[in-house]
Image (cartoon, rainbow, N blue to C red):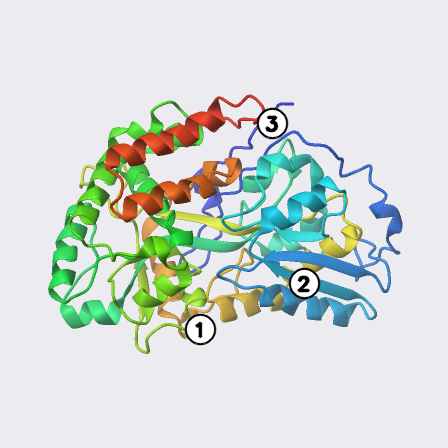
Amino acid sequence: MSIERKTVDRRTLLRGALAAAAVIPLSGALAACAGGSSDSDDNKAKGGKKSEDNPFGMAADSTTDAVIFDGGYGTDYVAFAATLMQKNHKGSTVKVSPTTEISQELQPRFVAGDPPDLIDNSGENSIGFSTILDQVEDLTDVLDANNLEGTKIRDTLYDGVEAPGTFDGKLAALNYVLTVYAVWYSSSLFEENGWTPPKTWDEAIALGAEAKKKDKYLFLWGKEAATYYQTLAIGSAIKQGGDEVRLALENLEANCWSNPSVQAVFKAMGKIVDAGYIKPGGAGTQFTAAQAQWSNNQDALLYPSGSWIENEMKDQTKAGFEMKGFPEMVVNTDSAMPWEALHSAAGEPFQIPSQGKNVPGGKELLRTMLSKEAATNFAKTKLAPTIVKDTVPADGFGSTALVSQSEMLSAAGSNVFTWTFVDLYGTNVDQLVVWNSFLAGKSSVKDLTSRLQQITDKIREDDSIKKIPVT
């Protein structure tokens, strides 16, 4: 089977964003050849009568089973939508089960033909999208339905949200949260010390020296999040070297990790490690505990992460921290993309397994999540926007980080990019080992490059894994 990725002009994707600054999701590559069909299951026969308030024909008194990744955004936002759904469908029940082990928990259920009705296929241990494409529903009918407020859902979303998850004409996933990847810092701490966010790696190294004078580190990390530094490195290298860097990595090319721009970033990181500007012990520290050393203790100045970081650490952040973010550093001002260029994409990919016992219920829960009420609740409680328009006020609900996201997106303009190969081929687990070793100073840039290339080469040379060409 051949799966062709649907391509979309990036400028088109950037239209219709938040007035203060918005962006269209540019991620979600899915592909594979697997068993199952979204049109041949018996699930649809188990539904009830379709109506304006029940567009998918969910059976009365039915139960919907949702398994949600319990990461930076938690699962209570889905529980909020579940409560709304149960109010609107008296007698119905929604079971929201949190997990941090999506792959380990759900792969056996897919194999057994007993998957949940809705899944948030996210996190470090998500199921490789390429393995379940033919086992999930086409979500086009969800976007064609009216939301709880009576407006067609697709008319309430940012332009282009279908394209990232559409393959061979099938909308296989809908990414719910708009994520900005950045380097985060305490603006109050920076202002107090007269520091400014670095735009180049040389400036970052100089800032590390200043941090050392204050008995602080430039960076720190936790073992489960070591690949946050890979994300930082890839983003920086793409900005420095341009699309050729992204395409080489996406297409698993031989020697892609040896690209000069990638190597320049790795070498700069190596200097930071060798200078002792990264707090030791991260390989033995749980990642949220490490993050608290940054957000609460302020042991380090900078932390690379997605925009979920504020919500994830809201109970472990020093009062007056005033969290803000800035784009990845570039190697030098000759970079192919400006420093303001930004890695941003929609995250939290929601999928509806075709063999779920209550497919209409899964779609109804997703429809409820896409209501104005549920999306606004998410933005307010998680301090991050969803793909639903007009849910974030100009003051960001009082969040400096949320306002900062809008400012970064506005400054980036059309210079927004992302990549998908890590999620598509499920390489994060193996790469975590490599990055923990490097950040701990136990391996060199040469070792880092070689080991990452070995992971890439293994996938490329495995004929049992369907490869998705990216152009």
Q: Are marks 2 and 1 in contact (CB under 8 Å)?
A: no
* Residue 176 drawn at (x, y percent): 56, 54
Q: Is residue 350 visible?
A: no
Q: Which residue is depicted at the point 17% across and 44% down?
A: 271
Q: Residues within 10 Å of mark 1 (few under 14, many from 20)?
A: some
Q: Which residue is depicted at the point 49% across and 49% down?
A: 124
**Which of labels 2 and 1 is toward the front?**
2
Q: Measure the C-alpha gap from mark 3 to mark 2.
A: 32 Å
Say above or below: 121 vs 279: above
Say above or below: 13 vs 364: above
Q: Which residue is depicted at the point 51% across and 66% down?
A: 379
Q: Earlier in the sequence, mark 3 or mark 2?
A: 3
For residue 288, side relative to residue 282 (left or right): right
Q: Which residue is depicted at the point 54% across and 41% down?
A: 164
* Amino acid tagged 1: Phe
* Amino acid tagged 3: Ile
Most distant residue in the bottom direction: 319
Residue that label 2 marks: 96
| Disc 1 element | helix
- Which of the 4 quarters of the picture holds residue 432? top left
Q: Earlier in the sequence, mark 2 or mark 1?
A: 2
Residue that label 3 marks: 3
Q: Is residue 462 visible?
A: yes
**Which of labels 3 and 1 is toward the front?**
3
Q: Residues within 10 Å of mark 2 (few under 14, many from 20)?
A: some
For residue 9, side relative to residue 444 (left or right): right
Q: Earlier in the sequence, mark 3 or mark 1?
A: 3
For residue 81, side relative to residue 69 (left or right): right
Residue that label 1 marks: 397
* Image quadrant in which the C terminus is located: top left
